[in-house]
Each structure stands twice: as structure tokens, then as C-alpha cells.
Amino acid sequence: MLNAKDIMQTQDMIANQHLDIRTITMGISLLDCADPNMDRCCEKIYRKITERAKDLVKVGEAIEKEFGIPIVNKRISVTPIALVAAACQGDDYVPIAKTLDAAAKECGVNFIGGFSALVQKGATESDWKLIRSIPGAMAATERVCASVNVGSTKAGINMDAVAEMGRILKKTAEATAQNDCMGCAKVVVFANAVEDNPFMAGAFHGVGEPECVLNVGVSGPGVVYHALQSVKGQPFDVVAETIKKTAFRVTRMGQLVGVEASRRLGVPFGIVDLSLAPTPAVGDSVARILEEMGLEVCGTHGTTAALALLNDAVKKGGVMASNHVGGLSGAFIPVSEDEGMIAAAERGTLTITKLEAMTCVCSVGLDMIAVPGDTSAATISAIIADEAAIGMVNSKTTAVRIIPALGKNVGDRVEMGGLLGSAPVMPLHTESSEEFIARGGRIPAPLQSLKN
């Protein structure tokens, strides 16, 4: 039962520590919208999304007002479009992307995810069609997010898809060059993608999900940072326990909002994703949590160990607060969306190599990283391959969301605004990976995939 102390603590977290519900995301199945005629398919998609999600924003705003809990984003995820559009006749899927964008605008949500393909073991003609539509789709839309799953622990890594995604990201940067290559910020390449992720850009509504479902993504780096200030100099056992208790309170709030929103919308409640998702605001940074543990700057020696502790403690605390925890759940390290990460990258302490090591123990991967505009497609593909290998071998989700900043070099800055923030252009190794990527084929699944 709540008492006055609990209520006052929550009010303080909201008012002074950047606590919020980062997103309520409605997942909608579009499998019944398949149609050989592209126009009819688009019409079905638009009608279903706008009917199902017509009250999503209104309900979210009502809960915000009544409960006093900020819900920053209201979003939609849909069945991977490569599945829905497989029967369609047409050269590309840009018309469907435009339909998704129009539906998102009509519903008032800030992003819609699911312009996606799952190609970890191989790709169909529809998968290739979607992948090659990504640059045009990102240039023609504002709110559509794309994702491609290129590997898994069970299947290995589809290196043909990895090679193609390097080229696609370069083309996407070119197609959106007038907007600081913003299109690439809405494209993520996964290994072990999950079906119930509420966070963008990687959200899609998996085929194992219900017809319609509501998932919640919570946040709270500022709350954890504030809690750790009270245990300065104490052993890591105390640090872990403090994070666990804080994560419990944060997740409990997400569970409350999710259950209430699903009741009002008349759709099943799915999961709470208890990830610590930072923002560019001062005081809302995962990097500052790691520094509060005793690191002078995020990225120095000890950073990976600190992040491992944080990720584990968040999961242990959050899983006790909700019957259904899912999504990605842990700590995110998006460079452009975390003011502490930005500062560490500008200082040169946080490098691509160190970030890659950190992705072995955090929730996702190399996220929102700007690299020089003349970076080759093969180098981008090699970065994707490295992250997919980490995910495959460690049986975890990893991802790459990278921005080749055309016309910019190391030390320049990419400005995206809002939650996407800004990113310093980071240096990469200059040695070539061309021959490695040109091999193609499939990297076999690791031995631990044989669990039957």
C-alpha cells in the first residue's frame, strides 16, 4: 500500500529528477491488410491504424493530467512491412511508408515503427524490396522508423544483408543530406531483435504478438543518479542495492500507467520495458550515473564494469515490480541523446572501440553515433557485423544506429534536435574492411544455439 512517504518520493522524482514515462506504444497487427493491389493495401493499413489508435494520444494526455506523471511520447508499432506487403505488386514500398506517415500524423503520435524486415537467416524478394526502399522512405516521411534484423543466436549472421545495409545507410544519408542526414537516425540494424520493444527506432509488432497491445517504456537515469549521490564511497553491494530499489519504484510507475492506459483503450497490456533511456537534458544521463560510481569521465577504464553493474541492477529491481517485463530492459547508451556521453566523446575518452566493449553488457548497442561523411559503406557494414557478432555470441539484443554525416569530419557536430539531440562526429579506424565484407554468405550460428 502507498503511504505519504512513497507519494512524496515519487513527486520529487517527477519534479526534480527527470522521471517520466518515455513512451506508451500501441502495437497493431497489419497481417490482415495484405493485398496484391498496392493502393488497396495502403488503404487497409491507414484505416486499421487510425481506427485502432485514434484515442491513444487522448488517453495518454488524460492519464498525464490525472496522475501527474509525464508521458513524453505516444507511439505506434506495426507488423514488419516486408511481411504485410509481400503480396503487393510494385517496385518499392515507399507508398506504404507514406501511408504509415499519414496515419501517424492523423493519430498525433510522434513516431511509427515497423518499416522492417527480418532477414537473419535469409531474405525474400519482399525483404530486399523493403530494404532497398529505406532511403526513399526516410526521405519521404517524417515519423516513420525502419529496422532490419540481420542476425540471431539461432541463425547466425546474414552477411549479404549486412553488406547491403552499409550501402543503404550511405544512400539514406545522401537522401536526407539537407537535414543533417536525419534519415539515418530513424534506421536501426539489429541482431536478436525483440517483438515487443516500445522504443524507437527499432519498434515493430512481432508475429507472436496479439492483434493489438499496449507496451510501456519507462525511464529514469536522473532518479538513479540522484539515489547514488546518497551512497558516495560505499561498496558496490550498496550501489547495486540502491539501483535495484530505485528501478523498482520507476518500473512500478510504468506498470500503473500501462495497466490504466490499456484499460481505457480496451486493448491488452503487454509489457513494461524498464530501460534507462537518457535525454540530452542535464541531469538525465546514463554517463553521469557511471561517473557517480567513481569514474572521472565515462569511457575511462572501469566504465564497462560500472555499466554491467547498472544494467544488472536495473533488471533485478524492475522485474520485481511488474508481472510482464520485456522489450530491451536495461541501460541505453545513445551518444547523441545523452549529454554526459556527448561530453565524454568530445573529450576523446569515449571512443567507438570503448562503446563497442560497453555494448557487451548494456541493453542495445552502438546507438546514435555520428561518423565522418566519407566513411565507406564497407566500414559501416563491418561495424554492423561486429555488433551482430556480440549479440549472436552473447544471446542478447544488439543494434547499430549510425549516422554518416555527409560533408562533416571528426570534431564537427550533427544537430537533430529534440530527444535525438546532437552528436560529435567520432573517429573510426581508417584501415579497410572491404575484402571482409565482400565475402558475403552467412556467419554460422554459435554452438550455444543448439539448445534443443
Image: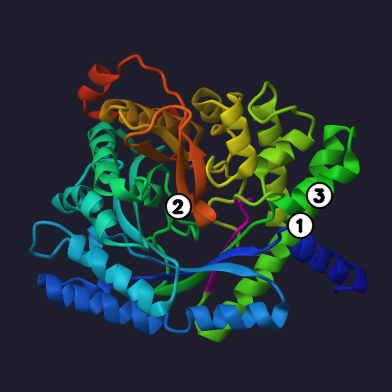
Are the residues tagged 1 and 3 within 8 Å (C-beta)? Answer: yes
Q: Which residues are magenta?
A: 269-279
Displayed quadrant of residue 260: bottom right
Query: Mark 1 or mark 2: which comes first in sequence?
Result: 1
- Residue that carries the numbered disc 2 in the rendered image: 194
Numbered label attached to residue 206: none
Q: How is the image coloured?
A: rainbow
Disc 3 to disc 2, how far (Cα)?
A: 31 Å
Q: Residue 418, image x and y in percent?
A: 52, 57
Is disc 2 surrounded by few (<14), some (14 to 19) or many (20+) residues within 10 Å? some
- Residue that carries the numbered disc 3 in the rendered image: 226
Q: Residue at x 49, y 27 (%)?
A: 352
Residue 436, magenta (yes or no): no
Q: Residue at x 26, y 24 (%)?
A: 437
Residue 311 visible in the displayed image: no
Query: Mark 1 or mark 3: which comes first in sequence?
Result: 1
- Which image quarter is the N terminus in? bottom right
Displayed quadrant of residue 40: bottom left
**Count of picture labels:** 3
- Residue that carries the numbered disc 1 in the rendered image: 17
